[in-house]
Amino acid sequence: MTIRKTITHVEEINSEYGARANPPLRRVAIAAVFENPLAGKAAGADLKPLIDYSLELGASLTKTALATLGASPGELRAYTKAAVVGIGGDLEHGAAMIHPRLGMAMRRSIKRGRVIIPGHAKVGPPGTAVDLIYGPLDDGWDLDAFDSTPVLIHDAPRPQEIVLWLGYATGPRVNARCKGPDQKEVDALVASFNA
């Protein structure tokens, strides 16, 4: 894999609308910009090279993200992933990066994460923005952990590149107060559909 560069975006949010965050909400978004080995190839090309890249990048980017945050895996509350494919590639190249195996590499690195990791892919020119949608790690109904951060890289992806993003957050949104239902409530509702 030829990585042209990596980008790290760190946020520490101390207050929102006059309310202090105690402790501050810390989020990290980290990206690798690399050459797409399938750019320009037919749509039916074998996606395995990109899936293999996602395993490697999931482990290495997670390690850097945790070091940057200065957080242990136990302090994490939310995670995210996304890919932006250059216009010489295909949307499925991004899907291959984020869907089959990346989440497993991220979970293996932090030794947690029961909930599906929100993620999406898109195709675009350099400077294409993507919204990283943070979702809860272990409790799917932890609605206060859902959040987003828009990110972009001014010179990526070039036509033959992919940008792979992943991110972690240490807490809920500042001022979050939308506690969701518990699993028992959801199970009862779903059971009522079959009655």
Image: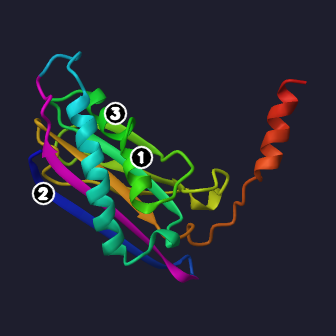
Dot placed on the residue nearer the N-terminal end, 2 or 3? 2
Residue that mark 1 sits on: 103
Which corner quadrant of the image does residue 10 belong to?
Answer: bottom left
Q: Look at the picture and state if 184 lies above or below 87.
A: below
Residue 123 visible in image: no
Instruction: Between residue 113 and residue 22, name the one nearer to us.
Output: 113
Q: Residue at x 37, y 78 (%)?
A: 70
Q: Which residue is mark 2?
A: 5
Q: Is residue 111 left or right of residue 28?
A: right
Local crowd size for mark 3, using a 10 Å CA cut-off: few (<14), some (14–19), many (≥20): many
Q: Nearer the viewer, residue 140 or 156?
A: 140
Question: CA–CA distance between discs 2 and 3?
Answer: 21 Å
**In this picture, is 71 found above or below 131?**
below
Say whether disc 2 or disc 1 marks the residue closer to the N-terminus: 2
Residue range in magenta is: 20-40
Q: Quadrant of the C terminus?
A: top right
Which label was assigned to residue 95?
A: 3
